[in-house]
Each structure stands twice: as C-alpha cells, then as structure tokens.
Amino acid sequence: MNKVLIITGGSRGIGAATATLAAAQGYQVCVNYLTNQQAADAVVAAIRSAGGYAVAMQADLAVEAEIVALFQRVDQELGPLTALVNNAGILEKQSSLLQMDQARLQRVFVTNVVGPMLCAREAVKRMSTKLGGKGGVIVNVSSVASRLGSAGEYIDYAASKGALDSFTIGLSKEVAEQGIRVNAVRPGFIYTDIHASGGEPGRVDRIKDAIPMKRGGQPEEVAQAILWLLSEQASYATGTFIDLAGGR
Ligand code: NAD
C-alpha cells in the first residue's frame, strides 16, 4: 500500500525535516505551506532530486474550507491518505497575560488547536475502517510548554499545546477501534524560525543552560521520533507522547 502523508507547515523547520525524512522512507508527501511557496518548492525539489516524491500545496489551516480543499486535493493527486502530521503552529511575541487580547488568543488557539482538530477530522474520515478506510496514523506536534506552562512568556501557546495534548488522548481513544493511532511529540527548544516570530531570535542559546543536555535540538531530531510514531514499529503506541527536550 502506498504511504501518503500530509505534513502541515512543511516548508521549513520541523515540518521540512519531517517531510524530507518521510520521503526518504518511501512516503508520498504533501508539503503544506501557508505563504512561502518558494521555501515549499525548495523542500519538494530536494526530495525529488533524492529520488522521493512530494507535492507542495498551499492552504491556510486557520480556514476550514481551505483544510477541506487541501485534503480533497491530496485524494486526487496522491491517493488514499495514510498519515497526517499536524505540525503547523504559531508562537506570538513574549508577553504576560495582561498584554494578551482576544484577537491574539483566537489566532493562537485557531492555529494550534482548531486547525489540527479539523485536519484530524478530515484524516479520520478517510482512514477509519468503519468508514471504508484502511486505517492510518496521526502525529500531533505539541510542546513541552504544555506541561511547563511558559509563565510570563507564552502562556497562551502553552495552554494551546495543553489542549492539543488532551485532544491527542481523547481522539486516540475515539478512533482506537477504527485502525487509527494518534500520538504526539513534545519538542523542547529546537533551532527553527519560530523563535524569531516569538520576538527573540537568540532565545535557544540564552536558555540553553536551563536544559540538562545544555543545547537546543535540531529539527531532524524531532523528525526521527515523528517517523517512528508513524511507523509499524510503533504499532502498539497510541494516546502517548514522546518528549524531545534534552531532559527539560
Ligand atoms: P516554524 O515557525 O519554522 O514552523 C511552523 C510552520 O507552521 C511554518 O511553516 C508556518 O508557515 C506554518 N503555519 C503557521 N500557521 C499556519 C497556517 N495557518 N496554515 C498553514 N501553515 C501554518 O517553527 P517550528 O519550530 O518548525 O514549528 C513546528 C511545530 O513545532 C509547531 O507546532 C511548534 O509549536 C512546535 N514546536 C516547536 C518548538 C521549537 O522550539 N522550535 C518547540 C516545541 C514545539
């Protein structure tokens, strides 16, 4: 059976590393991106030149109709979906709760929670053995922030990842008898551009002394765990988490 994977936010960072590793392991990969087509095309070109297969597909996952259209396009161009990695996420500027307004909270929760839930809904419709599918795997990219809380910095982000953790557990039980496994990875500080959008590009190096391993992680180190959870080697793992945080 063809292995068909959608990776959301796949044009850079953890998403790009996961897309690249998945393609090397034989997945046909939909590299979803929001705005940076050039970056998504570069990921796809690198995959193809290494002999893999990938297609870049634009969709804003904060918009339900775009999510639905993305999954339909994958049905048509790549065939039956077998795997989803809910990777896309945002981190807004560091601040205390006192500076957070409704618009910010909605942006963070729509992108980090509602989008992944709607993507998972579309995936389950296609994968569920009760609905004629052949099963599948979903991996959510959460964060260790969900158990640390990110006080005074990003409590909105931490709370959104807490919701994603809870969703991971709930959905894993809801679809366990439908041939679908649902798990999450929880990275710590990984060297990606998300920290630039959070207003502090040097953040990983500034806090690295607080990490028992005294370094940030690389996107590829997260991708390896995601690929394991997607694989048959993880056939009895569902509703569980892998923390990749250097001991934090
Ligand atoms: P990143 O900013 O490089 O990647 C996030 C991707 O999500 C980007 O490509 C962005 O365009 C995409 N995205 C955001 N909103 C979107 C939308 N509405 N529609 C489609 N795509 C959208 O950062 P990253 O570190 O690679 O982040 C990947 C995931 O890892 C995120 O969920 C993030 O919360 C999580 N994470 C990262 C770290 C870290 O330290 N880098 C730690 C813990 C968790």
Image: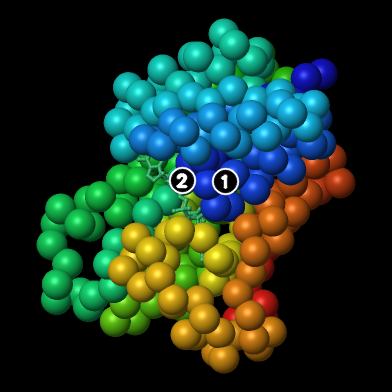
**Residue 55 spot, x, y in % from top left:** 59, 23
Q: How many badges with numbers are in the image? A: 2
Location of residue 213 (image quadrant): bottom right
Circle 2 residue:
88
Measure the alpha-carbon separation of dots 1 and 2. Answer: 8 Å
* In this picture, residue 197 sits left or right of residue 236: left
Location of residue 63 (image quadrant): top left
Tell me the element at label 2.
loop
Q: Does the residue labelled 1 lie within 8 Å of ligand 1?
A: yes
Mark yes or no: residue 27 visible.
no
Seen at 63% across and 58% down, the residue is 219
Identify whether 11 is placed above or below 44: below
* In this picture, residue 133 sits left or right of residue 39: right
Q: In which quarter of the image is the C terminus?
A: bottom right
Seen at 36% across and 73% down, the residue is 200
Q: Nearer the viewer, mark 1 or mark 2?
A: 1
Crowd class of label 1 (few under 14; some 14 to 19; many from 20; radius 10 Å): many
Q: Is mark 2 within 8 Å of ligand 1?
A: yes
Q: Nearer the viewer, residue 196 or 177?
A: 196
**Residue 139 spot, x, y in % from top left:** 62, 45
Name, please, the residue furthest toward the top.
Answer: 76
* In this picture, residue 187 sits left or right of residue 25: left
Identify whether 87 is placed above or below 64: below
Q: Which of 8 and 105 is in front in this view?
A: 8
Seen at 57% across and 91% down, the residue is 209
Q: Give the amino acid at mark 1.
A: Gly
Circle 1 residue:
15
Q: Give the amino acid at mark 2.
A: Ala
The coloring applied to the image is rainbow
Q: Nearer the viewer, residue 12 or 29?
A: 12
Tell me the element at label 1.
helix
Q: Are marks 1 and 2 in contact (CB under 8 Å)?
A: yes
